[in-house]
Each structure stands twice: as C-alpha cells, then as structure tokens.
Image (spheres, helix red, strand yellow):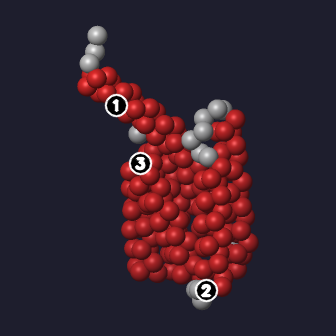
C-alpha cells in the first residue's frame, strides 16, 4: 500500500512523462515544418539575389508555398490522432501574418532590405514566444537567427541576400534538424 505522498509523487512523475511525450510530438511536427520553411526561405533569398526585380513575386510564392505546407502538415498531424498542433495555432499564424503585412504595407515605409530584416525578426519573435510555451529549442533558433540577421543587416553589404539565405534559411534548416534530435 502507498500513502498519499507516494501517490502524489507517482502522479507527478506520470505528468512529467506526459509533458515530455507531448513536447517530443510538438518538436517532431514543428521540426519538419521549420526545416521545410528553411529550405523555401533559402531558395527565396537565392532567387531574389539572382532576379532582384522579381522580389515580390518570389516572396509571394515562397510564403504561400510555406503556408500550404504548414497547413498540410497540421492536417496530416490531426489525422494521425495527435492533437499537438491545434487549429488555434493556425489561426494565430494567420493573424501574425496579417499583422506583419499591415505593418509592412500600411504603416512602414521600408526599403527592400528593411522589409527582409523586418520579416525575419518578426518571425523569430514568435518563435521565441512559442519557446516560452512549448520548449527552449524555439528560443535558441530565434536567438541565433536573429543575431545572424542583425549581423547581415549591418555588415553583409552587397552579399546581403546571400548572407540571409545562410543566416535565415540555413538557420531554420539547422534548427529544424536539431529539434528532431532533441
């Protein structure tokens, strides 16, 4: 027979295991989506460097492609019975995107370089916020990508888009792959 303290300790252990499994499932889903976004962003920067006059078209395709893949990942995840990417998250991401577009097109008078940095930093802010709720890996990805983005903004010069391909796109790919190993 166990007493109430032992029962409480056993339930705490069970809750700890449940949290770790849930966090692992979140990391598995998020890492796939983050890695795919990283590849798309990397390709977007390279394409933008190659065809600078087509920047808006390139980034529209990259963003809609990433959105479609993110939604598909969430739907596949829901069909598997795992409810670690609720519909509320999707709505949150859409609101984040809408607010970013509002700031970019209506409030801000950004040049191309500033728009690129704004979106990279804006996205990383939400990664950091997600990290507060679901795990430190998001915070690490956000901090590293933000630091590399700021370095590129101030020091990359004409190679800015190439540096951003590595810093932003490569940072997301590396972070997504790292999350799979946690």
Furthest-front residue in view? 4
Q: Secondary structure at mark 3?
A: loop
Alpha carbon distance from label 2 to label 3: 33 Å
**Counting residues from the N terminus, which is met first, the one under dot 1 or under dot 2?**
1
Q: Secondary structure at mark 1?
A: helix
102 lies above or below 129: below
Query: Dot 2 corresponds to which residue?
Result: 107
Residue 39 at least partly seen? no
**Counting residues from the N terminus, which is met first, the one under dot 2 or under dot 3?**
2
2 lies above or below 31: above
Query: Dot 1 corresponds to which residue?
Result: 12
Query: Dot 3 corresponds to which residue?
Result: 135
Q: Residue at x 57, y 79 (%)?
A: 115
Q: Residue at x 50, y 62 (%)?
A: 126
**Counting residues from the N terminus, which is met first, the one under dot 3 or under dot 1?**
1
176 lies above or below 97: above
Q: Secondary structure at mark 2?
A: helix
Q: Residue at x 65, y 45 (%)?
A: 74
- 123 lies left or right of 143: right
Alpha carbon distance from label 1 to label 2: 49 Å
How would you rate the neighbour count of disc 3 (Cα within 10 Å): few for under 14, some for 14-19, many for 20 or more?
some
> x%, y% of residue 72?
70, 46
The image quadrant of residue 57 is bottom right
The image quadrant of residue 14 is top left
């Amino acid at each position: 027979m166990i007493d109430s303290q032992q029962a409480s300790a056993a339930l705490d252990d069970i809750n700890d295991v449940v949290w770790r499994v849930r966090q692992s499932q979140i990391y598995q889903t998020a890492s796939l989506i983050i890695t795919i976004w990283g590849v798309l962003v990397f390709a977007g920067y390279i394409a933008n460097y190659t065809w600078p006059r087509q920047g808006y078209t390139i980034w529209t395709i990259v963003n809609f492609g990433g959105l479609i893949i993110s939604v598909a990942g969430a739907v596949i995840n829901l069909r598997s019975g795992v409810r670690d990417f609720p519909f509320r998250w999707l709505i949150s991401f859409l609101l984040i995107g809408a607010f970013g577009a509002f700031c970019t097109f209506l409030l801000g008078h950004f040049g191309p370089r500033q728009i690129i940095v704004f979106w990279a930093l804006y996205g990383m802010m939400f990664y950091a916020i997600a990290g507060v709720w679901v795990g430190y890996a998001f915070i690490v990805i956000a901090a590293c990508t933000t630091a590399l983005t700021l370095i590129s903004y101030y020091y990359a010069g004409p190679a800015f888009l190439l540096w951003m391909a590595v810093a932003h796109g490569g940072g997301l790919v590396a972070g997504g792959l790292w999350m799979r190993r946690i």
